Image (spheres, rainbow, N blue to C red):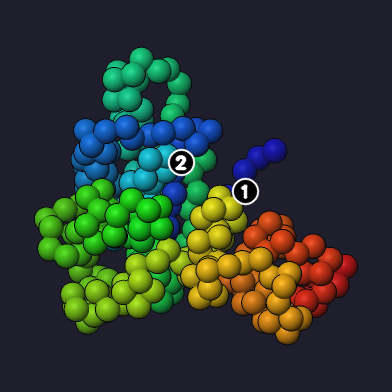
Amino acid sequence: MPHQARKKSGTGYYHVVPKGMHDQILFSSDADRQNYVDLLGKAKIENGILIHAYCLMDNHVHLVVEDTQDQLASFVKQVHEHYGMYFANKTGRQGGIFQRRYWSEPIDKESHLLSAVRYVHANPAVAGICPASIYEWSSAKDYLGRDGIADARTVLDMCGGLDGFIDFSRSSNWTAVPFPGSRLKRHLTDSEAAAIARTVLGTDGLLLGSEDAASRKQKLMTLYAQGFTISQLVRLTGLGRKEIEWHLEIKR
């Protein structure tokens, strides 16, 4: 079955998430991570791409980029081909290490761009690695003054400078919450989705069976409006599909 064509962004901004094949680990050392960052820096110049945010996790990468010359595919291909050769030389492993079709989503609003940058920077904190502001392998430090590969000027200007950016980031405790309506939530693991759902609801627990009907309805509608699927809500809340659809007034 042929893949659907990627949606084009009217602004040129995209959130891009390359993942390891079968969720395999992509980076096992700081040398690996530095190699990938260096490749991003080289490829962005050669393809006319601006990187507004990035974050390297063990088995996937988050990028917020600006692509005004329609070179996103070329940019990603260049980085991954060169990193794939580096990885093969290091490990002896043959074959591609990235999923052939990386996930991407257009960012068409200024508010969504800000939320996407905050989301990307928050990944290490959500994963329990360290606070976002001190994670070495994201662009958060570029925003805080490091001379790195990220172009921080656009977002800093939107926030009114560094202090405004820090306040905006702290307003969600550097917590990873994709912008409303983002399709990213459909690609999250259940543990990642649960962390986001708890942040959205401002609660530690998600099992809603013991709550009254009005509370269940309100929380389900909040999560559904944020883009969670019915199947995710079933797994996260412990409620049955028919009950969730009834609360959301979804008719079959």
Q: In this orientation, which residue lies closer to the viewer: 109 or 45?
A: 109
Q: Residue at x 40, y 70 (%)?
A: 115
Q: CA distance from mark 2 to mark 1?
A: 19 Å
Q: Which residue is mark 2?
A: 19
Residue 248, quarter of the rendered image = bottom right
Q: Secondary structure at mark 2?
A: loop
Residue 46 appears in view:
no
User: What's the residue type where badge 2 is placed?
Assistant: Lys
Choose the circle earlier in sequence order: 2 or 1.
1
Q: Residue at x 58, y 71 (%)?
A: 226
For the C terminus, the quadrant is bottom right
Image coordinates for residue 101, horizontal then vertical, percent: 52, 40
Count of numbered tags: 2
Image coordinates for residue 1, horizontal then vertical, percent: 70, 38
Q: In this orientation, which residue lies closer to the viewer: 117 or 7?
A: 117
User: What's the residue type where badge 1 is placed?
Assistant: Gln
For residue 59, side relative to residue 164 (left or right): right
Mark 1 Cα shell of 10 Å, populated few (<14), some (14-19), many (≥20): few
Residue 212 appears in view:
yes
Contact between labelled residues 1 and 2, with CB atoms less than 8 Å apart: no
Image coordinates for residue 93, horizontal then vertical, percent: 40, 18
State the residue lying farthest toward the bottom: 214
User: Given this view, does label 2 or label 1 mark the residue nearer the observer?
Assistant: 2
Mark 2 Cα shell of 10 Å, populated few (<14), some (14-19), many (≥20): many
Q: Which residue is mark 1?
A: 4
